[in-house]
Image (spheres, rainbow, N blue to C red):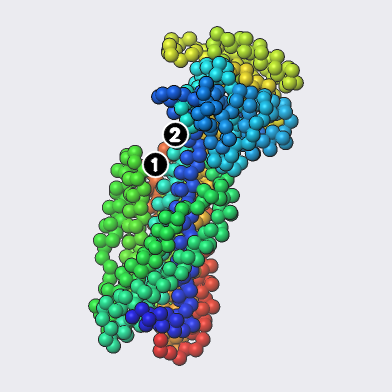
């Protein structure tokens, strides 16, 4: 049977081979995007592992060093400054921070490659003056989140105020002096949040890919079913039919999956240029690993094989009905009930703090939408046929009723992308939500009892650096809420002219460096910079998910439109032989596609917005509205373009209207 399957696959003729090529193209694209989705999760985990050493864990036994972490800024970019004071015996222990060849000594500075290059390019008064001491080496990639990250490791003595004074405040990016036994650390909260968002984005991408991959196995389904029904009628057993179907589908899918892997590997350098969480990627981060790759190369052919077998029920049970092209029984309304049930669970899932629960519920809503699609298409077909006022609409309506699954496969990609756009459109934040914080007012925190002296020193330093600024003091409020274990703090506010450029601000930052040990001068914009980066990354992530989904949708529409023409080439030929103009057939195809697309695309968009409502606390932003409008335009435009590309194939299969046996 395997030999017969291979012979039938090779001898399928020109049109049959075209159908096989279409299936292989669909599986190739699905495999490449599936690997991309898996790599996104692996890449963020790799970043979290490399960043962990900057989140020190208090030593329970013998400590080798004191570590503190702070953030500085230059040219509106974040600099991570790690201060390390080695303790007695640190050199002999052999313990040192990742990316360094040894423990930093007092007075030494280690810079990341990007920060070292920036320090060489900028004048000393803008950057290098903040790190007095000897540049002892370059930080290796194993200690950096991304290739362009700005990181400095500064060596201090154990009695230096920078590692002995308790910080005036602490956060996920400002960590006070911590005695550490090693530099393994723990994962930071920011990258953990990115991993959660990546899981949700993966669900939004993987479910359409699985649907598309499964649909790829059912391309040219009518041609295959006719051939298998003929084999059943001449004596082939149901087991032999199933074996032939699985063999043919998996042979094609296995080869296409390997091509998908090659396509993804070739695109990795381009994907690495996408900036998220502050910068681009190391290409090595985007390699999913041998085990995930092997799993995908095994799972994709299995999925295609199972999907191909699912549609064999009629061939196995009623081969004569398939051969006679009888209309299959209609689908049941239980499909619509399943969709409403899945949507009803979404508000309940939003109360859960588990990202797994949210991801599973979104996946169920996706799958329920895909399950409901063919039923809605059959209803649209009955209505279209009933209200038809011309032959094109009548042909389209009857076709939708006869084979709603095939019509749904043509528009499923765009419809599911509409769900993604509706979901992400409401969740896309607007930068205007954060206001317009000042970037020319610098703030230095100081102990309340020393704030006047700190302000005087700030004026003197700024004068020596030639920076014009007004320095004033903001005393702490006497509200009686101060805690005994938290030092009372005040603010020294340095107001530069509103016209000050980035160079003047950087010069002022350098002049104020070390004014209060363990603290740097920051602006209101700096305090919101992480939020601005996160909002920008959410928009970038939304565009990536929508871009990948649109790629799947448009490729799916083009492949299934061409496959549909091949499936119905004998029907088209007979209609042409009966005198039907080619323009009528072409118009019927457009109605058959655009009417269900308008209904299901709009319904999917609303379903996605409904699923997003429990997670939003603001109105639709301008960016979200733009996403929705672009989705509608690109979705319809892509399907129309895919239909236009299959038009020459329609002319080709009807050029000789005389019916030919398959």
Reading the chain from its start, which is encountered first: label 1 or label 2?
Answer: 2
| Quadrant of the frame with the C terminus | bottom left
Q: Position of residue 60 (x, y in %)?
A: 40, 24
For this rendering, which residue is in front, 209 or 72? 72
Q: CA distance from mark 1 to mark 2?
A: 28 Å
| Quadrant of the frame with the N terminus | bottom left
Secondary element type, mark 1? helix
Q: Position of residue 511 (x, y in %)?
A: 68, 21
Looking at the image, can residue 596 be seen? no
Residue 181, above or below 271: above
* Horizontal relation, residue 629 to residue 505: left or right: left
Secondary element type, mark 2? loop
- Residue where numbered disc 1 is placed: 615
Q: Position of residue 183 (x, y in %)?
A: 49, 32
Quadrant in which residue 196 is drawn: top left
* Horizontal relation, residue 230 to residue 172: left or right: left
Q: Position of residue 533 (x, y in %)?
A: 54, 38
Q: How many marks?
A: 2
Q: Residue furthest front?
A: 92
- Residue where numbered disc 2 is placed: 186
């Amino acid at each position: 049977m395997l030999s017969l399957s291979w012979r039938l696959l090779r001898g399928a003729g020109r049109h049959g081979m075209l159908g096989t090529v279409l299936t292989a193209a669909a599986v190739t694209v699905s495999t490449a995007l599936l690997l991309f989705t898996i790599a996104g999760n692996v890449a963020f985990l790799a970043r979290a592992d490399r960043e962990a050493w900057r989140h020190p864990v208090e030593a329970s036994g013998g400590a080798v060093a004191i570590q503190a972490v702070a953030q500085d800024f230059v040219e509106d970019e974040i600099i991570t400054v790690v201060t390390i004071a080695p303790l007695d015996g640190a050199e002999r222990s052999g313990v040192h921070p990742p990316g360094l060849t040894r423990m930093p000594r007092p007075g030494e500075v280690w810079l990341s490659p990007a920060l070292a290059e920036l320090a060489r390019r900028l004048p000393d008064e803008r950057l290098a003056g903040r790190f007095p001491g000897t540049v002892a080496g370059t930080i290796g990639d194993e200690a950096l989140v991304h290739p362009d990250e700005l990181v400095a490791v500064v060596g201090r003595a154990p009695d230096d105020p920078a590692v002995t004074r308790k910080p005036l405040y602490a956060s996920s990016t400002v960590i006070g002096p911590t005695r550490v036994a090693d530099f393994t650390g723990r994962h930071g909260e920011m990258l953990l949040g990115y991993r959660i968002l990546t899981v949700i984005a993966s669900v939004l991408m993987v479910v359409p890919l699985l649907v598309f991959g499964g649909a790829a196995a059912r391309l040219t389904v009518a041609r295959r079913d006719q051939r298998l029904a003929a084999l059943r009628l001449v004596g082939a057993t149901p087991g032999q039919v199933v074996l032939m179907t699985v063999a043919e589908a998996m042979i094609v899918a296995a080869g296409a999956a390997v091509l998908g892997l090659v396509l993804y590997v070739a695109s990795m350098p381009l994907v690495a240029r996408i900036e998220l969480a502050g910068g681009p990627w190391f290409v090595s981060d985007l390699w999913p690993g041998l085990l995930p790759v092997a799993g995908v190369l095994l799972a994709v052919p299995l999925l295609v094989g199972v999907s191909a077998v699912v549609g064999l029920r009629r061939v196995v049970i009623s081969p004569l009905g398939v051969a006679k092209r009888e209309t299959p029984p209609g689908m049941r309304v239980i499909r619509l009930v399943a969709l409403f049930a899945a949507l009803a669970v979404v508000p309940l899932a939003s109360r859960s703090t588990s990202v797994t629960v949210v991801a599973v519920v979104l996946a169920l809503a996706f799958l329920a939408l895909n399950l409901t699609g063919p039923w809605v298409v059959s209803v649209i077909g009955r209505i279209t046929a009933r209200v038809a006022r011309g032959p094109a609409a009548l042909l389209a309506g009857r076709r939708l009723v006869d084979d709603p699954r095939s019509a749904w496969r043509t528009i499923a990609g765009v419809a599911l992308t509409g769900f993604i756009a509706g979901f992400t459109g409401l969740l896309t934040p607007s930068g205007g939500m954060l206001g317009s914080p000042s970037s020319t007012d610098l703030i230095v925190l100081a102990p309340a009892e020393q704030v006047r002296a700190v302000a005087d020193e700030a004026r003197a330093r700024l004068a020596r650096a030639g920076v014009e600024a007004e320095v004033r003091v903001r005393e702490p409020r006497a509200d009686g809420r101060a805690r005994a274990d938290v030092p009372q703090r005040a603010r020294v506010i340095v107001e530069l002219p509103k016209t000050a450029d980035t160079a003047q601000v950087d010069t002022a930052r350098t002049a104020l460096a070390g004014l209060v040990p363990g603290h740097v001068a920051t602006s209101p914009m700096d305090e919101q910079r992480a939020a601005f980066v996160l909002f920008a990354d959410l928009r970038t992530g939304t565009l990536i998910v929508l871009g990948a989904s649109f790629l799947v949708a448009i490729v799916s529409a083009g492949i299934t439109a061409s496959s549909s023409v091949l499936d119905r080439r004998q029907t088209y030929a007979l209609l042409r032989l009966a005198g039907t103009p080619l323009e009528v057939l072409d118009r019927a195809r457009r109605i058959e596609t655009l009417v269900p697309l308008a209904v299901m695309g709009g319904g999917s968009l609303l379903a996605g917005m409904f699923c997003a409502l429990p997670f939003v606390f603001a109105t639709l932003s301008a960016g979200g509205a733009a996403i929705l409008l672009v989705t509608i335009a690109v979705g319809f435009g892509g399907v129309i373009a895919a239909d236009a590309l299959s038009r020459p194939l329609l002319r080709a299969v009807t050029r000789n209207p005389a019916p030919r046996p398959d």
